[in-house]
Amino acid sequence: MKYRKFGKLDWQASALGFGAMRLPVLNGNQSQVDEAQTIKMIRYAVDHGVNYIDSAYGYHRGNSEIVIGKALQGDYRGKNENCHKTSLSRSHSPKDFDRILNDQLKKLQTDKIDFIYYTI
């Protein structure tokens, strides 16, 4: 795997990341992520050097972060940086932002998100 400097940070991102916008689903239902297949895919990517996983609060109607949290249990947690997006259109106040962030942390089964991107 090739890695590239990530901005001014002392960290290098894998040239290929794992995007969780279009995960395998069950019965054609975008809210029903095929957890077994997705966990297998994420762990394969991490085992082969991917250290950048990208998701967003609304992907798969809020379920992509749940399966990512499951996939990154155990030794997989420390092998990557979690990068998530949240939409400013969902956050109308600091209270909204806190609520969404806390929901993301719960779904990801972690106490931190390494990078958060704001989208409009």
Image: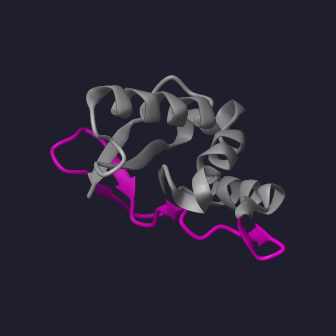
Specify whether 114 is left or right of 38: left
Provide residue 12's location: percent of width, then percent of height. Answer: 33, 49
Magenta run includes residue 60: no
Specify whether 119 is left or right of 71: left
Q: Is residue 98 above or below residue 45?
A: above
Q: Quadrant of residue 2?
A: bottom left
Specify whether 83 is left or right of 46: left
Q: Residue most toward the bottom?
A: 28
Q: Quadrant of residue 99?
A: top left
Q: Is residue 42 above or below residue 98?
A: below
Provide residue 70's location: percent of width, then percent of height. Answer: 71, 41
- Does the image show residue 34? yes
Q: Residue at x 15, y 44 (%)?
A: 8
- Give the magenta range: 1-30
Q: Residue most toward the top?
A: 111
Provide residue 17's location: percent of width, then percent of height. Answer: 47, 62
Q: Residue at x 62, y 30 (%)?
A: 109
Q: Is residue 47 above or below residue 16?
A: above
